[in-house]
Image: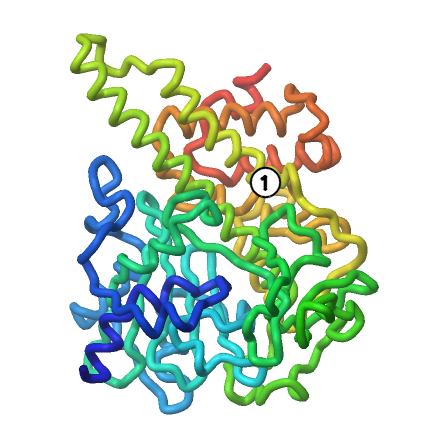
Amino acid sequence: MTTRRINLSLLAVAAIFLLGVVILPARVQGQIAVRNQGFVPFSDPPINYRGEVNDPVAQLQRRVETGAVTLQWDATHGYLKAVLNALHVPISSQTLVFSKTSFQYRKISPRTPRALYFNDDVYVGKVHDGKALEIVSFDAMQGAIFYLLDDRPVERPTFQRAELDCTVCHVTPNTRSVPGVLIRSIFPTATGTQSARTPSYLVGNETPLANRFGGWYVTGTHGRQAHMGNVTVQDAESGLLDPAAGANLSDLSSRIDTSLYLTPHSDIVAQLVQAHQTQMHNLITLTNYQTRLALYEEAAKNRATGLAEGTLSDAARARIEGPAEQLVRYLVFADEAPLEGEIKGTSGFTEQFAARGPRDSKGRSLRDFDLHTRLFKYPVSYLIYSDAFDALPEPARSYVYRRLLAILGGSEHTDEFTHFKAADRRAALEVLQQTKKGLPGDWQPQQRQ
């Protein structure tokens, strides 16, 4: 088998482990994945996961094919810089993971970590001296779409869509059982594998800082708060990491050759944002899928029983509102683990990320950071502006808006939604009223009096 054929046949394996799942080398060595063969979840109606998509990478591929965009290859970083530029992914988002995650695991170690870059819709992975870029791109209707780009110079490079093996690990309870992404924190050995008989942590809003970043490099300051980044362990018996060993690190030059990467940073603020949005993406996709599935099944039942079109049973409504409520809770950071001191990054990501947000007449944005007691200043995720959020089908979208208005507007009084001060919730409401397109009519002040 030629190298070219191996690259294409292992498309899915590459994407499976993009964001930090611990790889099992024997599995990769023994499995050859072929696109469009075998079972892929959600392939059937109404989801049709294998159908046409319009995610950012699919859009870029069409521009490359027509010649509207040319991706320049360079001998140092391959297509990486060109792809990041074309997909509007900031270099300052770089995070470095040294756990052996990726089908290119042999080239990943604490001395040669894999670089990850992201924006609101796309994740790009680059292994030093690797053969391919690994990409996850979010489609508004279908969730995570997996791609691999052969990193050798050709006239018109092709983003190959991967399906089969990606869904083995990327449609699991860890991704809310839909095509999605996840970040794990592990106790890594000196080779980058997970230390035997040690736990791992799925990272999201609710994960304490002390359980984050295992198997990752982290640059930035965080005071006396502990985390698991920047260090390795020898065995299970010594599996408890020394909180001080990798703390408040601003220079990685003693750990890695930073000249191999686009920046010398693995910014702590970028790490926190990346962890938040992975599970946010999954919950949006979950709500989308469950709503479409419920409506599809109800339509068939209504036809069979002679019920009026659009009739929705209590069971179907519960199936829709269950994930929608999970989405609302995550959207407003209901279970967010608190921070306990000032956090500062090193790459400029903090400033660049905040600058991209729409602002209201008072200059406020949902992308404004707190970084003292919590991640963001205002209690609504910036991904409410995403195409995927706007694509939520009815009645899920109306449910989310109704619950969100109750929480921000003060009519929801349960303790789980009072972790933010009333002034901050009111500010978030005002920001959305001025900056979010397509809000229901009752969101406007005059409509609620």
Q: Residue at x 39, y 54 (%)?
A: 170
Q: In which quadrant of the rendered image does the N terminus lie?
A: bottom left
The three-letter amino acid code for the residue at tag 1 is Val
Scheme by which the image is coloured: rainbow
**Residue under the point 53% across and 47% down:** 382
The residue to which callout 1 is attached is 380
The answer to which image quadrant residue 225 occupies is bottom right
At 38% from the left and 49% from the top, the residue drawn is 171
On screen, residue 295 versus residue 231, left or right, reads: left
Give how far across and how far down residue 340 sits, in percent.
Answer: 80, 53
- Quadrant hosting residue 353: bottom right
User: Which of the image's four quarters has the C terminus?
Assistant: top right
Front residue (pair 33, 273): 33
Can I make out residue 350 in this image?
no
Q: Is residue 408 above or below residue 317?
A: below
Quarter-of-image position of residue 257: bottom right
Residue 433 spot, x, y in % from top left: 54, 33
- Left or right placement of residue 78 versus residue 92 in this view: left
Q: Residues within 10 Å of mark 1 (few under 14, many from 20)?
A: many
Residue 269 position within the rendered picture, expressed as x and y whole percent measured from the top left: 64, 62
Identify the residue shown where x is 21% and y is 40%: 44
Q: Report the label total.
A: 1
The answer to whether any part of residue 309 appears in the image is: yes
Looking at the rendered structure, the secondary structure element under dot 1 is loop
Q: Nearer the viewer, residue 298 or 384?
A: 298
Q: Position of residue 133 (x, y in %)?
A: 36, 74
Query: Image check: 217 left or right of 282?
Result: right
